Amino acid sequence: GGVLDPETTDKPHKFTIVSMQLSAPTSKEDLRFNILKEYVLDRDPDGSARIFGKWSDYFKGSYPQFKGYIATEDLDKTFAETRYTLVLPTAAGWVTSKYAEMLQLGVLPFLHPDYDCQYHIVPKDHPMRVKDADDFYKKMEYFDANPDKRIKFIKAMQQQLIGDAFSGKFMIDLINTNLEESNVNVKLSTDEVSLYPKKEKVIEVKPKKVSLF
């Protein structure tokens, strides 16, 4: 557990996302690709954005941003070096914990307009939400021009949105919200939860395994 301090963590990479193809491998149309094209590929002339995840050659085309598969154990290190990401909508409209994992790594997770349409995570006009691709780029440019503001904002979001994550209260609140929406008359209690002190997150760099065969 623990949280990375965005102030003391070197973040040379502007944008990283993990996103895989939604459609069948032979498909020529993909909803997620359309979003990535609009929000990332069309606005990244120097090819510095990094997209990890499996995509067919048809979609990868000549875009250098597609980096292919990444091992789970390398994800923390990769995002620890990243300033921003974009949280994309899921097919069923579920709220995932990705934004929380990103904040933990000191990454600013912007929310796509179609993500969390019920505004469970943050209110409608919250600065973490982007209205469109222009808004997304303006915000990244603003925070890159004012790194102290980025750091301050991330720290505030870490406190506000994931301060509870380490006590288990976070998951219980999320489950309770889902139960309420399903009109299930059950509520989990958070009274007995022991609060853990916030720890610094340490990124472990695993030595690469050397195969003899």
Image (cartoon, rainbow, N blue to C red):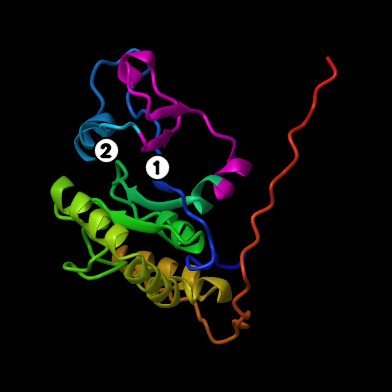
> What type is the residue that disc 2 sits on?
Val
- Residue plotted at (51% across, 29% down): 69
Q: Amino acid at mark 1?
A: Ile
The secondary structure type at the circle numbered 1 is strand
Q: Secondary structure at mark 2?
A: loop
Tell whether 59 sits left or right of 74: left
Q: Does residue 82 lie above or below 159 as drawn?
A: above
Measure the C-alpha gap from mark 1 to mark 2: 10 Å
Is 75 magenta? The answer is yes
> Left or right: 104 with respect to 210?
left
Q: Residue at x 54, y 66 (%)?
A: 8
Residue 104 percent location from the top left of the image = 50, 63
Residues packed near mark 2 inside 10 Å, few (<14), some (14 to 19) or many (20 plus): many
x, y (%) of residue 162?
Answer: 46, 71
The one nearer the camera, 36 or 164, is 36
Q: Residue furthest right?
A: 212
Residue at the disc numbered 1: 17
Q: Is residue 136 magenta?
A: no
Q: Is residue 113 in view from this perspective?
A: no
Residue 212 location, quadrant: top right
**Circles 1 and 2: CB distance less than 8 Å?**
yes
- Residue, disc 2: 40
Q: In the figure, residue 62 lies in which quadrant? A: top left
In magenta, the rendered stretch is 48-77
